[in-house]
Image (cartoon, rainbow, N blue to C red):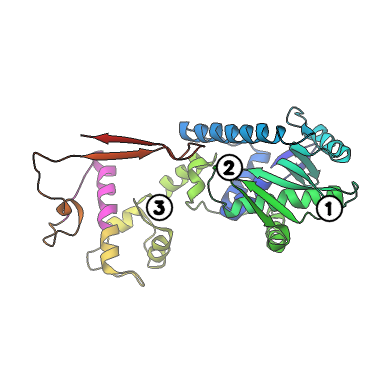
Amino acid sequence: MQKKDKAVLYSASDIVSFLDCEHKTTLDLIDLETPLPKAEDDEETMLYQKKGFEHEGSYVEHLKSRVPVFVDISTVKNDTDAAAATIEAMRSGADIIYQASFIEHPFLGHADFLKKVSRPSSLGDYSYEVIDAKLARNTKAKFIIQLCFYTELLGYLQECEPIMMHIVLGDGREESFRYSDYSKYYAMLKERFMARVKSGHKGTYPEKHDHCAICHWRNICEDQWIKDDHLNQVANISRVQIKKLEAGGISTLKALAEIKNNANIPKMMPETLNKLRRQASLQFKKRQTGQNHFELLPHDPARKRGFARLPKPDKGDIFFDMESDSMDIDGLEYLFGVY
């Protein structure tokens, strides 16, 4: 979200973020009024972004070689001018429009591509559909939400609701989705989002999610968790387990580390509770002493777990290692090692 001429504009990413983590929406709203410190992208995040740009650039070259009229809006930096250039390109009947921009207050959208299709609209005997390029090899729910966002705005411009929307995945496959299959859900989500942002700085608490590693507010949330001694600091603990512990009166890592061996938490197996307690205890000891601590698991006489499953060492042993590059656009490439 961003402020332009005292008005706030919301993007597809804002709605996706709200679906994932309402607290991020809270921090985004605060940042509009009082800028917050953002975390810097790490090397892996920057590499993923670089690979994404390369994937998009490769698809640009592919489309340029296949259509007569390819219009590039990416060179227009001002959002208002880019939106006007997009409308002009649509009216001219361009086959592909790259980095199309839409402004329909309070929403601002930047779609990777618009492709011309043979369906009448206010533009003439044709209209457009959205294509988004994603480095991932499988379609995710948030990709569909983003497509719906752009497709709705596109529909307003051409006065005709697009039938299909498309994703080009990292392996080159194109997947298509019928907009009407998702539009009602998207409309409800957008309504919830707008109600949320209109309510202002609502008190929310950060919960750990998969996308925390790439969120630019992650340092703020991590500081909050350390200050509150949050249970999510316990290694390998799940959100479901955290909720059960909190319902049972255990709300901090310290409290979990200090519970008795025979403690009982409703709807949690004693073995699970004991495992979490022991893990929290090790982490709590490090906090107190500054030293790493470990605990040896009991020997497995049935040889079904851990190192007990390995055969006894032999001078003829061969160790084999296989690594892959999940970010390779052309497919997995393997590095083999033998010792």
Instruction: Give the alpha-carbon distance from disc 3 to disc 2, as whole Å.
Output: 38 Å
Q: Residue at x 80, y 43 (%)?
A: 103
Q: Are marks 3 and 2 in contact (CB under 8 Å)?
A: no
Q: Which residue is mark 3?
A: 232
Asked which quadrant contains residue 186, the reply is: bottom right
Name the residue carrying label 1: 119
Q: What percent of the width, then of the height, locates residue 282?
A: 25, 49
Q: For numbered disc 2, what is the local secondary structure?
A: loop
Tell me the crowding category of disc 2: few under 14, some 14 to 19, or many 20 or more residues within 10 angstroms, Cα based: some
Mark 2: amino acid: Gly
Q: Which residue is mark 2?
A: 172
Queried whether the magenta region covers residue 296, the answer comes back as: yes
Residue 336 location (% of width, % of height):
31, 36
Q: CA distance from mark 2 to mark 1?
A: 26 Å
Residue 302 placement: quadrant: bottom left
Q: Nearer the viewer, residue 225 or 332?
A: 332
The three-letter code of the residue at mark 1 reads: Arg
